[in-house]
Image (tube, rainbow, N blue to C red):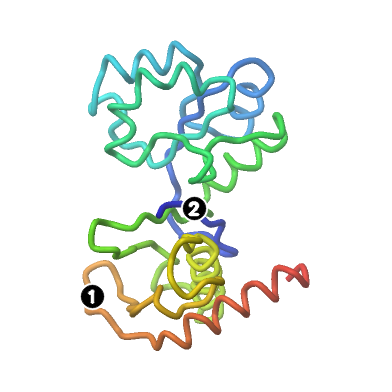
Amino acid sequence: MRGAVALPFGTGKAAKVAVFADGADADAAREAGADVVGGADLAAEYAAGGGAAVSGLDRCLATPALMPALARAARVLGPRGLMPSPKAGTVITGGPAALAAAVASAKRGGDAAFRADKGGVVAAPIGRRSFPPDQLAANFGALAAALLAARPRSLKGGGGGVSGYIMGAHLSSTMGPGVPVAVAAVAAAAASAQASKKAGG
């Protein structure tokens, strides 16, 4: 399971973003503040340069047209969680305006990427300790909703609930101790986020 969610109040960390695009899409990405923009040439550069070439990057976005060219850089981007994919929401359709919006969101740390490890544990940022409690709660709810939406259809229990899916949850600062969160509270936070989204809040 993997994906990304747009947090209402961002993560609080400015990101370094690379965009694989051509033409008007590339122009829009540059204007939106992308740190690196290129097409097949950039993919080839990353493929040849290895890990050192992508050092410092936090996010890679791409247009569908550039995905074939990115195949050569997959061995470099993939292991670092940087390979654009539709599942992760990093292959952007909708033209220059949609790409510019995605770049702007990524630059402000608006998206939180998540991925389950081999043990089924998901770790993702939801903000900084300096955030007001209501902002952290809203970001937590958005993440919880995204995790429930990503629940595999084949999993026993059906539906998008927490039963048999989310077994436990903790909150912590980067190096701080984990504070247990009731699973019922995770479901409630997700429901609140979904209701807020429907209401346009």
Badge 1 is on which residue?
Answer: 176
Q: What residue type is labelled 2?
A: Ala
Dot 2 lies on which element? Answer: strand
Looking at the image, is mark 2 or mark 1 earlier in the sequence?
A: 2
Which one is closest to the eye, mark 2 or mark 1?
2
Query: Taking 6 as reference, is 2 left or right?
Result: left
Answer above or below: position of 173 versus 150: below
Instruction: State the residue at coordinates (42%, 52%).
Output: 2
Query: Taking 33 as reference, is 60 left or right?
Result: left
Badge 2 is on which residue?
Answer: 4
Query: Taking 111 as reference, is 26 left or right?
Result: right
The quarter of the image holding the C terminus is bottom right
Q: Residues within 10 Å of mark 1 (few under 14, many from 20)?
A: few
When asked about the image quadrant of residue 79, the answer is top left
Residue 193 screen position, x and y as percent: 62, 74
Answer above or below: position of 168 versus 45: below
